[in-house]
Amino acid sequence: MVPMLLTKGYEVVGLDTDYYQRCTFGEGIVEIPEIKKDVRNIELADVEGYDAVFHLAGLSNDPLGNYEANLTEDINFKASVRLAELSKQAGVKRFVFSSSCSNYGAGGTDWLTEESAFNPVTPYGVSKVRVEQEVSKLADDNFSPTYLRNATAYGVSPRLRFDLVLNNLVAWALTTGKVFIKSDGTPWRPIVHIEDISRAFIAVLEAPTEAIHNEAFNIGRNEDNYQIRELADIVKETVPNCEIEYDPNGGPDKRCYRVNCAKVSRILPNFQPQWNAKKGAQELYEAYQKVGLTLEEFEGVKYKRIAHIKYLIGQGLLDTKLRWQQEELAVIN
């Protein structure tokens, strides 16, 4: 997102606690001014003078969200609402929240629009729902929040995650020769490239206020809803000499949802997604080859979110409430 914003001429300042500063993939990140701070500790001065806040911070997947539910409550929910309150107080006009299609959770096989019922099944999904509900109450003539319910992300980025379905399947295929499916392959999941998520944020930033004021948008494309087994087939076609293997203990994943993304295309015509699963799988395969990705690295503490957090705690760098105790940088092999 940062290089895309810079290319368009925006001034960008980052704010992050940097849990994953040791986890950069590939060539590294673009340097911008940064406030290094836990989202739980943000003060009014941190958000004064800005036209917009893009709120992306949070415990970012289900294993991490399940690690301690109280932490997900404090970081993903309470701190997010407080950030919105401070942003409003500071005179920030636009607050764009990175929500999730996990809000729909056990949504079944019917098409889900932004008006469909929430049915989250994890602390992560619950936190996203609650933030939307609370922040919507802050909307007024001077403060316009928007909620981008991103499909499951994929694609190459400097802080690439291997706990996302397409990223994960391609990594398994390259490093083991197997496309390993942990469910029975039937659940539906919408996916969207991280670059296209970034395009959606920029489209909101550039849209007329009346188009985005207190609105939620499903972010993705209708044609990019896949069953997990369909994604496995795409990976098998992309990575030479690999076979699909199902976990013998895998059953149907209760996280199953298909989302209708017609609203964002209708309301934000500047949002033009550029990626699909086939193109994304090829990008991932080539990137993994370029860095010589190994199974040890893929399954190690560098790129697994929950494993990395536990590593930092074990090293005495974080306490059990995920607050920094010391921050000496260490290389993770």
Image: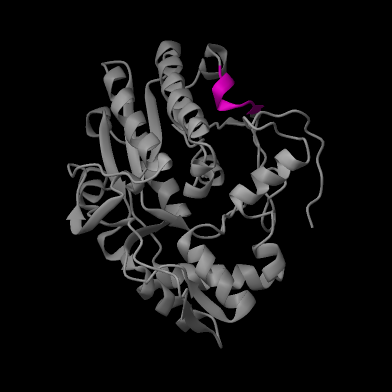
**Within the magenta stretch, is there residue 38?**
yes
- Is residue 29 among what the camera can see? no
- From the viewer's perspective, is residue 247 above or below residue 299? below
Estimate the x, y position of residue 82 in percent, counting from the top left. 45, 19
59, 223: nearer the viewer: 59
Residue placed at 81% from the left, 50% from the top? 331
Residue placed at 80% from the left, 40% from the top? 329
In the picture as drawn, the residue positioned furthest to the bottom comes out as 241
Report whether 44 appears left or right of 270: right
Residue placed at 71% from the left, 71% from the top? 292
Indicate how the structure is coloured in the image: one colour
102, 24: nearer the viewer: 102
Residue placed at 71% from the left, 39% from the top? 313
In the picture as drawn, the residue positioned furthest to the front comes out as 249
Chain part drawn in magenta? 35-42
Estimate the x, y position of residue 198 in percent, counting from the top left. 44, 46
Estimate the x, y position of residue 101 in percent, counting from the top left. 33, 48
Estimate the x, y position of residue 21 in percent, counting from the top left. 69, 43
- Is residue 90 among what the camera can see? yes
The part of the image, by quadrant, that contains residue 272 is bottom left
Q: Quadrant of the C terminus?
A: bottom right
- From the viewer's perspective, is residue 14 above or below residue 112? above
Report whether 65 appears left or right of 36: left
**Within the magenta stretch, is there residue 261?**
no
- From the viewer's perspective, is residue 82 above or below residue 247? above
- From the viewer's perspective, is residue 220 above or below residue 76? below
Marker count (numbered): 0
